[in-house]
Image (cartoon, rainbow, N blue to C red):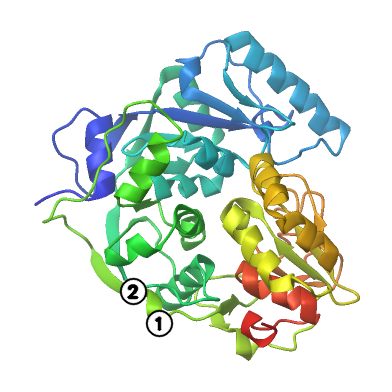
């Protein structure tokens, strides 16, 4: 019996000929990503050594720019750490900042066939790059930083064969909402994506789907390595790598076909995404006070382009705050050059610096009591973006942008 993508990556990283579901593996870690939260007074530990500074990336993303004294103090501590150990890939507040998973994508730090860990649950975003990427707890992250290794129990794999092509107005976020609504959680399982439909999904679309694997409770969410991916990585990172695709006789606990042609705009109702998706038409006329586009899932240049397309020549409805957060400052700059930022701001949007802020209810868009928000971000949990009495609907950037214009949830096709 052959191996899946994740099994082949773990076999390489653990120096074994074969790995199967149920095995415990100790693997070499190729990249460890630390965040500003790693240096927060409540989380940090004194680190006396690092295994290899060239395998560490530090990205300030959650509390940036620093909104309070404690965050600022953590930033100072992290800068000293990066200087002490010679961390070359350090993304401080400035032109190189961004949401960690988006920075990793922009710079191709997550190489195909490699292992990447980070202290954030949406680390699975790098699975779009044929990488075994996972969020781990602080003790395991510190272990990887200081020893260069970590461990995993290999889970069963569910395979999704993508066929067809998304129609205009339907996006990768709708694909995720379909998977969550139809198949529910994937606890203790890996997800593998491939099939002929992959050729019609750009890198940013794959990133959205991989990122949202965390909301399916998947252990890993990995994509096959096709020529599109290989070209993208080689254009950004000259480090050699060994991509891993599944064996023809790989064992899957289930194999499912997803017809991209059949996808439609969906919305997740408040408080959970699991088996909670409905067509946009089912919740039209839900009045909103805030609309948000951003996060590691939907802060790409493609997402900002789609939002600008929807709002061009229109105005945000009175009483609605339309917030847009690019995933990185690099994306922000590209959106400026392309004219997307001007279009969004002319419509009445507020475009913020790259940060996790509004997504996790930290700053730059916290919800108040009783408010309703429609978001193209990562989570719609109760209290996620602010007050626990606020309601959070999740949808694609196109749906969010259209809703900001209408003042209520609406399918973007109805204002197009």
Q: Quadrant of residue 134?
A: top left
Q: Quadrant of residue 199?
A: bottom left
User: Is residue 347 or residue 24 the one in the foreground?
Assistant: 347
- Label number found at residue 262: 1
- Crowd rating for badge 1 (residues with CA inside 10 Å; few <14, some 14–19, many 20+): few
Q: Position of residue 253 (x, y in %)?
A: 23, 63
User: Is residue 193 or residue 76 the one in the foreground?
Assistant: 193
Marks 2/1 in contact by CB < 8 Å: the verdict is yes
Q: Classify residue 235 as left or right of residue 338.
A: left
Q: Position of residue 370 (x, y in %)?
A: 84, 73
Q: Earlier in the sequence, mark 2 or mark 1?
A: 2
Residue under label 2, please give it: 164
Secondary structure of the residue carrying numbered label 2: loop
Marks 2, 1: nearer the viewer:
2
Secondary structure of the residue carrying numbered label 1: helix
Q: How many numbered marks appear? A: 2
């Amino acid at each position: 019996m052959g191996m899946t993508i994740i099994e082949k990556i773990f076999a390489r990283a653990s120096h074994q000929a074969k790995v199967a579901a149920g095995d415990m593996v100790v693997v070499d870690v190729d990249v460890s990503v630390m965040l500003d939260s790693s240096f927060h007074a409540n989380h940090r530990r004194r680190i006396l050594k690092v295994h290899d500074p060239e395998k560490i990336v530090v990205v300030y993303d959650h509390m940036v720019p620093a909104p309070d004294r404690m965050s600022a103090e953590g930033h100072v501590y992290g800068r000293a750490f990066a200087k002490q150990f010679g961390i070359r890939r350090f993304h401080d507040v400035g032109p190189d900042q961004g949401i960690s998973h988006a920075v990793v994508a922009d710079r191709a730090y997550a190489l195909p066939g490699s292992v990447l860990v980070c202290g954030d649950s949406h680390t699975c975003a790098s699975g779009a790059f044929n990488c075994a990427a996972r969020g781990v707890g602080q003790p395991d992250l510190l272990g990887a930083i200081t020893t260069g290794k970590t461990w995993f129990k290999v889970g069963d794999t569910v395979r999704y064969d993508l066929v067809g092509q998304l129609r205009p107005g339907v996006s990768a976020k709708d694909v995720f909402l379909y998977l969550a609504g139809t198949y529910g959680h994937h606890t203790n399982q890996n997800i593998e994506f491939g099939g002929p439909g992959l050729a019609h999904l750009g890198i940013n679309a794959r990133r959205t789907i991989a990122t949202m694997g965390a909301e399916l409770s998947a252990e890993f969410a990995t994509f096959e390595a096709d020529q599109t991916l290989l070209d993208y990585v080689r254009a950004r990172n000259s480090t050699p790598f060994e991509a891993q695709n599944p064996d023809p006789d790989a064992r899957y606990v289930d194999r499912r076909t997803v017809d991209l042609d059949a996808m439609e705009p969906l919305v997740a109702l408040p408080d959970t995404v699991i088996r909670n998706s409905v067509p946009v038409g089912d919740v039209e006329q839900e009045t909103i006070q805030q609309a948000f586009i951003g996060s590691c899932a939907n802060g790409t240049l493609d997402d900002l382009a789609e939002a600008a397309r929807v709002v061009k020549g229109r105005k945000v409805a009175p009483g609605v705050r339309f917030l847009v957060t690019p995933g990185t400052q690099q994306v922000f700059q590209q959106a400026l050059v392309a004219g997307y930022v001007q279009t969004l701001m002319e419509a009445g949007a507020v475009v913020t610096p790259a940060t996790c802020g509004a997504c996790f209810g930290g700053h730059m868009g916290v919800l108040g009591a009783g408010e309703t928000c429609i978001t193209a971000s990562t989570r719609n949990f109760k209290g996620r973006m602010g007050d626990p009495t606020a309601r959070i609907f999740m949808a694609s950037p196109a749906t969010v942008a259209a809703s900001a214009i209408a003042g209520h949830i609406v399918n973007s096709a109805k204002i197009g």
